[in-house]
Image (tube, rainbow, N blue to C red):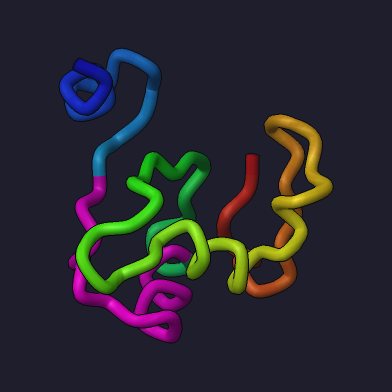
Amino acid sequence: MAADAIRDGAHGAVLVNINPAYRLAELEYVLNKVGCHAIVAAEHFKTSKYLEMLETLAPELADAEPNALRAAKLQNCAP
């Protein structure tokens, strides 16, 4: 399972769980705090629309090349 590989660091990544109840401002704070280099997320769950939240925080996603996202609101998240 992909989550197991991430948790075990098989790809050089560290799994950081984020509270699924977080709203936009909380998600922005946490992503910048941890300095993420990759995000694995469901598109939505119940009333939370994770993909929509990410697109709001990083509209640059629509045009970014793989491994080259530079998002103004996610300054500490870099490829």
Q: Identify the residue at horizontal 20%, vertical 75% (top origin).
A: 21
If the image is split into quadrants, where does the N terminus sit? Answer: top left
Q: Is residue 2 above or below residue 36?
A: above
Instruction: Name the one closer to the observer, 43 or 35.
Output: 43
Residue 78 place in picture, x, y as percent: 63, 48
Q: Nearer the viewer, residue 50 or 14?
A: 50
The x, y position of residue 70, in whole percent, is: 75, 54
Return the x and y of residue 46 as percentages of the image width and height.
21, 65
Segment colored magenta:
16-31
Q: Quadrant of residue 48?
A: bottom left
Residue 16 in the image: state x and y as whole percent: 25, 49
Q: Is residue 17 left or right of residue 39?
A: left
Q: Decide: is 59 above or below 37.
A: below
Q: Is residue 50 magenta?
A: no
For residue 25: magenta? yes
Q: How many labels, in total?
A: 0
Classify residue 35 as left or right of residue 69. left
Residue at the far bottom in the pictured view: 25
Residue at the image position 39 percent from the left and 66 percent from the top: 49
Which residue is depicted at the point 19% across and 67% down? 19
Which of these two is toward me, 2 or 73?
A: 2
